[in-house]
Image: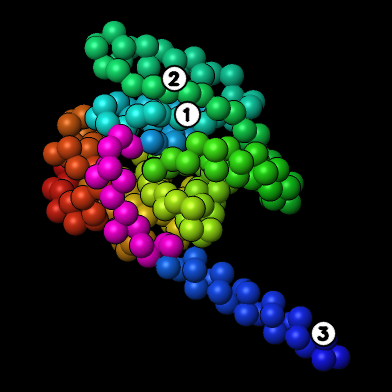
Amino acid sequence: MAVLLGLLTGLCFTVICVIVRLLIVIRSGSKCKPGEKGPVCVLIVAGSGGHTTEILRLVESLSLSYSPRHYIIADTDKMSEDKIRTFENSKKDTGSKGQFTIQRIPRSREVRQSWSSSVISTLNALLYAVPLVFRLRPDVVLCNGPGTCVPLCAAGLLLGLLGLKRVLLVYVESICRVESLSLSGKILYHISDYFFVQWSTLKDKYPKSIYLGRILLYDSSQLLYDSSQLLYDSAQLLYDSAPI
């Protein structure tokens, strides 16, 4: 009985330590300024269809200091790789230089997949996401809703939890979401450092979120990189930015 009591006490203590450490990591986001030490390695989560189009619109506005850019797509995604390569080649044609890679992991959830099987497929994706994120060690994870972003953000959070590297998690909810968040948004709302919504109705429901109007309609010089200080000038810049 004493041994069992000791094990339970140790387990409770471990869980409490993990929770406290997790809260510390989540709340330290505003102090993390990766751009102060040089180029910003960014991990960009692309999803099939409109998600990839939207995320590329966001990436288009980033400065050349966001390099290398690591695009992550699902292994069943047949179209996003072509879109990404076309986009990156167009940047080269305009004289913009920067390294990029395209990586694949298993899809977390297929369209109309049942919730019970989604748990299994997400855990499977997490097994691939953790070693990938630990190898790439990004400064920023940028995503906008595909299910694949959940295990990748979890892996980025784990880096900070273990004290290896603080990774900024930036989530931009799709412009299609007017009244409610996507499932990915509902999960990542609680752990993202910067959580953008594009409709004021969502800002009212989720006070932690940042509403700047229709981000995808911003001029490229304002979108996520206003006055060459995105992410590494703290949340004050984000809140001071005028909405459209």
**Which residue is the extreme one toward the right?**
1
Q: Is residue 36 left or right of residue 44?
A: left
Is label 3 or label 1 in front?
A: 3
Asked if the magenta segment contains residue 90, the reply would be no
| Location of mark 3 (residue) | 4
Q: In the figure, residue 189 lies in which quadrant? A: bottom left
Residue 128 vertical placement versus 235 (above, below): above
- Secondary structure character of the magenta stretch overall: helix
Residue numbers of the magenta segment: 25-40
Circles 2 and 1, Cβ within 8 Å, touching? The answer is yes
Q: In the figure, residue 16 lies in which quadrant? A: bottom right
Residue 153 is at least partly visible in this image = yes
Residue 183 vertical placement versus 144 (above, below): below
Residue at horizontal 36 percent and vertical 62 percent from the top: 28
Q: Quadrant of the N terminus?
A: bottom right
N-term-proximal mark, 3 vs 1: 3
Residue at horizontal 69 percent and vertical 77 percent from the top: 11
Residue 143 is at least partly visible in this image = no
Separation of residues labelled 3 and 1 (CA atoms): 47 Å
| Location of mark 1 (residue) | 71
| Location of mark 2 (residue) | 84
Q: Nearer the viewer, residue 133 or 219?
A: 133
Dot 1 alpha-carbon crowd within 10 angstroms: few under 14, some 14 to 19, many 20 or more: many
Amino acid identity at mark 3: Leu
Q: Quadrant of the C terminus?
A: top left
N-term-proximal mark, 2 vs 1: 1
**Which residue is the extreme one toward the bottom?**
2
N-term-proximal mark, 3 vs 2: 3
Amino acid identity at mark 2: Ile
Q: Nearer the viewer, residue 213 or 32?
A: 32
Amino acid identity at mark 1: Tyr
Residue 208 rendering spot, x and y as whole percentages: 33, 62
